Image (spheres, rainbow, N blue to C red):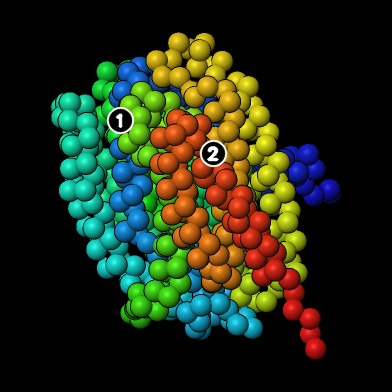
């Protein structure tokens, strides 16, 4: 009697589907597809429905919300990296650097539990500070700068919802960093994918109902709350049971790396994303809307291209912890090449298709002129290269690029204001490119590759 067995084809299909389901890269690719679909499908609807001044006001809102998140000050990536080191078995982690390697035999779940307890108290304070910044700082500036546009009921309600979204996001922001640091990238990307679908659905329904800015703000609320709830549940399942501990880390243990990481994030924001606020200060809301849409496309392309590398950060941290620099160098080289190729391809497509697409749908808000749009894509490319190498350096628990980043940020803002007043939008865009190319664009990659060079054994 011949025993029954699964046909080879069916077995291979089942195995392939299982690999797809458990692949962080493929889940990340799905997020890329959904984000791209949102950029292609949702953004044109927004631009067609909303008046250009409302589009400009929305990008100013988002810029203010980004400023408020500065109060997070870089704790989350440090918490995520600590989780990676503890997952690799580390008992203790130096305040800066990793020495000769800190890995151990078994994951240190006690230390991970301590990170959770510390983060819960810390992020309550961060959420309160961010909320106060949005209400008193952002609200006052908007009232003084755009009194007529901001005091409309729709604009006020949308800003209130955005405040709630930012506060809720900040309150539980660390859960995503922990999940990422524990190498659960697939789960994190899965939750993000679900949140994006919900976000786009809410935005489309709200715009169809004539809610305007309120629809966009409601989508941000979904995007900030839903994935955090799912991430928290996943983390608590990982460290529950026999692993749970009453140990508690202290934020001072993370502070030496955190303030450096935080200043680096602020400097990165000032070097390019903050130019939207500079544009709003120098020019009218219609111009700010065109600039914001064009910059969003460039930054979205950077985000999509960077996914190849970002999913490897937990693994890179673990490789650093075990002093496996040769393997880490190969991994970075492969993913960096994929990221750059992806950026070039997507930027070329955006330059050719995006203006025609907006014209086809009769968008009320246009992109910047083609020369300025091309220049802005170059600015985003330079920023992408510098940021990618800086992120790899952070997996070694240190930031040797910090002074250069701070100087670049200050110079970019000042040059943007001066050149923007002298030469208009073109001067504003050219400023960060010139400043970055003068030093950061070659210095930071040089530091990155040096840090990945294996130390010869004597």
Q: In the displayed structure, does residue 108 sit left or right of residue 443?
A: left
- In the drawing, what numbered circle is on residue 57? 1
Left or right for 50, reference 372:
left
Q: Position of residue 311 (x, y in %)?
A: 59, 54
Identify the residue shown where x is 51% and y is 52%: 187
Secondary structure of the residue carrying tag 2 is helix
Q: Report the residue marked by disc 2.
A: 430
| Residue shown at 54% from the left, 34% from the top | 376
Q: Observer-nearest residue: 50 or 444?
A: 444
Is disc 1 placed on a helix, strand or loop?
A: helix
Q: Is residue 359 above or below residue 291?
A: above
The residue positioned 55% from the left and 65% from the top of the image is 401
How far apart marks 2 and 1 lie (CA) works out to 24 Å
Image quadrant holding the C terminus, namely: bottom right
Q: Residue furthest right?
A: 1
Q: Nearer the viewer, residue 32 or 333?
A: 333
Can you give x and y, in whole percent of width and height, for residue 68 in the image?
Answer: 30, 51
Q: Are there few (<14), some (14-19), or many (20+) residues within 10 Å of tag 2?
A: many
Horizontal relation, residue 388 to residue 325: left or right: left
Report the number of discs. Answer: 2
Residue 351 figure quarter: top right
Q: Can residue 30 be spotted in the picture?
A: no
Looking at the picture, tell me which residue is in the foreground, 173 or 297: 297
Q: Quadrant of residue 115?
A: bottom left
Q: Please report contact status of discs 2 and 1: CB closer than 8 Å, yes or no.
A: no
Instruction: Give the image location of residue 12, x and y in percent.
Output: 75, 43
Q: Can see residue 86?
A: yes
In this rendered view, identify the residue nearer to me: 20 or 205.
Answer: 205
The residue at the far bottom in this view is 458
């Amino acid at each position: 009697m011949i025993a029954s067995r699964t046909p080879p084809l069916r077995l291979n299909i089942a195995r392939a589907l299982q690999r797809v389901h458990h692949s962080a890269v493929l889940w990340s690719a799905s997020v890329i597809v959904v984000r791209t679909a949102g950029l292609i499908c949702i953004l044109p609807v927004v631009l067609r429905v909303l008046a250009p001044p409302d589009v400009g006001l929305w990008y100013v809102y988002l810029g203010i919300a980004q400023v408020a998140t500065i109060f997070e000050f870089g704790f989350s990536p440090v918490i995520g990296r600590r989780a990676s080191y503890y997952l690799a078995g580390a008992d203790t982690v130096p305040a800066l650097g990793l020495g000769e390697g800190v890995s151990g035999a078994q994951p240190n779940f006690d230390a991970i539990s301590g990170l959770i307890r510390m983060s819960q108290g810390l992020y309550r304070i961060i959420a309160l500070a961010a909320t106060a910044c949005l209400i008193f700082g952002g609200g006052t500036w908007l009232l003084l700068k755009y009194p007529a546009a901001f005091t409309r009921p729709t604009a006020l309600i949308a800003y209130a919802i955005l405040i709630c979204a930012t506060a809720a996001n900040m309150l539980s922001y660390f859960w995503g960093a922990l999940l990422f640091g524990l190498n659960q990238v697939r789960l994190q990307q899965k939750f993000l994918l679900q949140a994006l679908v919900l976000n786009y659905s809410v935005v489309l329904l709200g715009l169809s109902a004539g809610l305007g800015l309120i629809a966009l703000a409601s989508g941000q609320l979904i995007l900030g709350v839903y994935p955090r709830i799912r991430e928290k549940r996943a983390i608590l399942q990982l460290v529950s049971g026999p692993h749970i501990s009453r140990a508690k880390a202290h934020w001072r243990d993370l502070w030496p790396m955190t303030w450096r990481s935080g200043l680096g994030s602020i400097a990165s924001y000032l070097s390019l994303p903050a130019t939207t606020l500079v544009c709003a200060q120098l020019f009218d809301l219609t111009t700010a809307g065109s600039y914001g849409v064009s910059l969003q496309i460039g930054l979205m392309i950077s985000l999509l291209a960077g996914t190849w590398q970002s999913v490897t950060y937990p693994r890179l941290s673990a490789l650093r912890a075990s002093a496996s620099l040769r393997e880490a160098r190969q991994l970075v080289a492969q993913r960096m090449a994929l990221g750059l190729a992806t950026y070039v391809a997507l930027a070329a497509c955006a330059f050719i298709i995006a203006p025609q697409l907006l014209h086809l749908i009769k968008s009320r808000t246009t992109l910047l002129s083609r020369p300025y749009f091309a220049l802005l894509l170059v600015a985003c490319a330079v920023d992408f290269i510098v940021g990618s190498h800086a992120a790899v350096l952070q997996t070694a628990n240190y930031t040797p690029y910090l002074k250069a980043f701070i100087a670049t940020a200050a110079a970019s803002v000042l040059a943007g204001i001066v050149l923007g007043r002298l030469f208009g939008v073109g001067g504003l865009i050219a400023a960060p490119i010139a400043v970055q190319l003068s030093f950061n664009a070659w210095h930071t990659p040089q530091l990155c590759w040096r840090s990945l060079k294996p130390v010869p054994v004597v």
